[in-house]
Image (spheres, coloured by chain):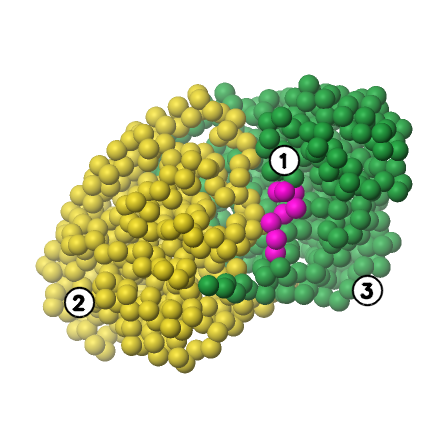
Chain colours: A yellow, B green
Amino acid sequence: MEYKFSDRTNNLKPSAIREIFKYAADPTVVSLSAGNPSPDAFPVKELEEISAELFKKNPIGLLQYSVTEGYPPLREYMKKYMAEKYNTGSDDDDIIITTGAQQIMDFSTKALVNENDVIITEAPSFIGSLNSFRAYNAKLAGVPVESDGMNTDLLEKALQENENVRFIYTIPNFQNPSGVTMSLEKRKKLYELACKYNVLVLEDNPYGDLRYQGEFIPSIKSMDTEGRVIYAGSFSKVISPGMRVAYVIAPKPIIQKLTVCKQGSDVHTNIWSQMMCYEFLTKYDFEAHLEKLRTIYRKKAKFAMDLLDKYCAPEITYDKIDGGLFIWCKLPEGTDMLGFVKQAIERKVCVVPGNAFLTDENETSDGFRINFSTPTDEQLEKGIKALGKLIKEIV
Amino acid sequence: MEYKFSDRTNNLKPSAIREIFKYAADPTVVSLSAGNPSPDAFPVKELEEISAELFKKNPIGLLQYSVTEGYPPLREYMKKYMAEKYNTGSDDDDIIITTGAQQIMDFSTKALVNENDVIITEAPSFIGSLNSFRAYNAKLAGVPVESDGMNTDLLEKALQENENVRFIYTIPNFQNPSGVTMSLEKRKKLYELACKYNVLVLEDNPYGDLRYQGEFIPSIKSMDTEGRVIYAGSFSKVISPGMRVAYVIAPKPIIQKLTVCKQGSDVHTNIWSQMMCYEFLTKYDFEAHLEKLRTIYRKKAKFAMDLLDKYCAPEITYDKIDGGLFIWCKLPEGTDMLGFVKQAIERKVCVVPGNAFLTDENETSDGFRINFSTPTDEQLEKGIKALGKLIKEIV
């Protein structure tokens, strides 16, 4: 029989990045296309201890139904931690736990965006979030990212030109895929524009704790005097993505609506993983763990950038990064980017083509994304060397 | 500031049942209002062993990102198990793992139902599913449940009278809240009507394995020659609800669309819990475990029904149940049901008022739901005795 899908999902396709992953699954291919934490970054021993202890102390609590809002001690702890450490979240805000931060994108769109309403995003932006937005038939308006974040003049233009803008979506720290961090000035300007044009802000901060160098910049949520910012935090990059635990801090009326969405979606987040995160945060030295992660990634990032300098310069250029897991590489003007990525795959190196991160995948991009956290040093050297050889042949 | 929510979620309220749970949280109150498995029903020792073993054998696999469709060995195993044991799922179908069965209701509505399209449900029906449907502004049409399932004449009438019916939602075994099981004849008739009126069927079967007595009745999915049935199975009632692991078997094009929905919602289900279920199903004696659960619940169900006979007859009537976790109690004609439930709460007994399970909560109901799996025997006796005393005072 023929299946008729809803208007909102009728044109949804599997993410383009999944096509790439098919090649990446081939063990002879060097994949620089993932976004996975390094296997070295998991606190395996600690989590093993915690899990065993939880089974001893509270097995029924681990296995029984729990509450939609999330494990109460974890909510309380994170509310206090984020307020005290980052001035993120006030008495007018509340916090709930979600099944990964992707669910925050899903529920925010479900709760706030009618079909054909507009969401403004960075261009390029994280494909997973774009697909969450697309699944509700939202219109996406992309604003180019510069080396200090979204171009705020063009942001204002987008706010003027689009009707029914519901929120601005931004990843201010070590953006995926560009690696760029938004300056303090631009954060202030973005918040000012949100107030001026009466829209909300969805601030997605999965990589904030992975700053290897440079100075901390306050969150947009920390400037939120009017109750306009929904802040998405996650344990995926700092504890474990397989656990699927994230948290959202937002004005109370919005949290209430997101809670109703969650109740009708997955009832509550896996309770074992919530308890695991809480125990790890409170019984172990989380700051020392973060410092360990920074050391791992700082080294890997430098190694990858040195390889780019050695093998790919001057044809391929990139902005140095201060944190996160991604480097955005630019091809020389006029290069056929998709052709380059396809030829790279033939040479057994997999990167993500830049157009995958655009609000309209049919637009062209002169860049591609590489990830350095997942591959080994040997794979990084092999992969980046092959990319360099290829670009020098093409140019 | 004033927040403007999407049309689809604007009128969504927290589930009425949550109000009840506020009272139920009071430790001096006997709660007969939950739907939780009995604490005795969890295979704690086995799960503790499995978790420890997984941390030893494959810690990175437990903690790293995984694939949207679900842990491949669990998918393969369940596909074969359901086909061989229950003739449920064919070569035209596929299976994915979800974060609880509630997510199947969410994604099925997202993928298949436009706002104001119609979903036909049993009346009464499971409040969680009704709220999933409501969260996309679907219109709900309720068809009365009889002692052998949905009235199929009224089902046909609903199919004739409503335009844009997208699917029929049914819990054929030990329905929540009515406890009723749909007869084979009615299952055949329901499928026939789905074909005649060209609609899909969403068959929700969380309690099927908890049959204490009587004969097994084939699933509607097992009759699905035309590819019209989406089958929702769950480990919540047979392994652990806190783990949030369920599975959906449906025609391949529908599974593809549900997968895209899942990718944009929580990326994948917690991988630890998927591996836990797989190991428990394959390395332990799952059939013996199910038999143990049946023994626990058979005993508890009989105990509860005996108490109803002893304390509440003849004023309160109910249909004997063959499985599941709920008994539907009917008050004498003309009794103010909501008044009864409120007075019961004052006497420290919490049950769920029947109107909470209707497509329109403002309709009246002459019944209420009690659960016997969560309370202890002492609590059951105390609670049902108090209900009996109350009804005899009122009548």
Q: Is residue B4 left or right of residue B15?
A: left
Q: Residue A258: which numbered mark, if any?
A: none
**How far is mark 3 from mark 2, CA to CA?**
64 Å
The chain to which mark 2 is attached is: A
**Residue for point 14% across, 63% down:** A312
Vertical relation: B217 (above or below) A381: above
Vertical relation: A346 (above or below) A42: below
Secondary structure beneath dot 3 equals helix
Say whether marks 3 and 1 touch (CB < 8 Å): no
Please state which amino acid type lies under the numbered disc 3. Glu
The chain to which mark 1 is attached is: B
Q: Residue B23: which numbered mark, if any?
A: 1
- Per the rendered image, the range of residues in magenta is B12-19
Quick check: is B15 in the magenta stretch?
A: yes
Secondary structure beneath dot 1 equals helix
Residue A307 on image: x %, y %: 13, 56
The residue at which mark 3 appears reads as B161
The chain to which mark 3 is attached is: B
**Residue for point 20% across, 45% down:** A294
Q: Are dots 1 and 2 on a single chain?
A: no
**Residue for point 22% across, 63% down:** A183
Question: Does residue A31 show up?
Answer: no
User: How dense is the environment of label 2, judged by Cα within 10 Å: few (below 14), some, or many (20 and up)?
Assistant: some
Which quadrant holds residue A295?
top left
Residue A48 on image: x %, y %: 35, 28
Q: Nearer the viewer, residue A83 or B84?
A: A83
Vertical relation: A214 (above or below) B2: above
Q: Is residue B298 left or right of residue B146?
A: left
Which quadrant holds residue A350?
bottom left
Of the residues tagged 1 and 2, which is closer to the observer?
Answer: 1
**How far is mark 1 from mark 2, CA to CA?**
64 Å
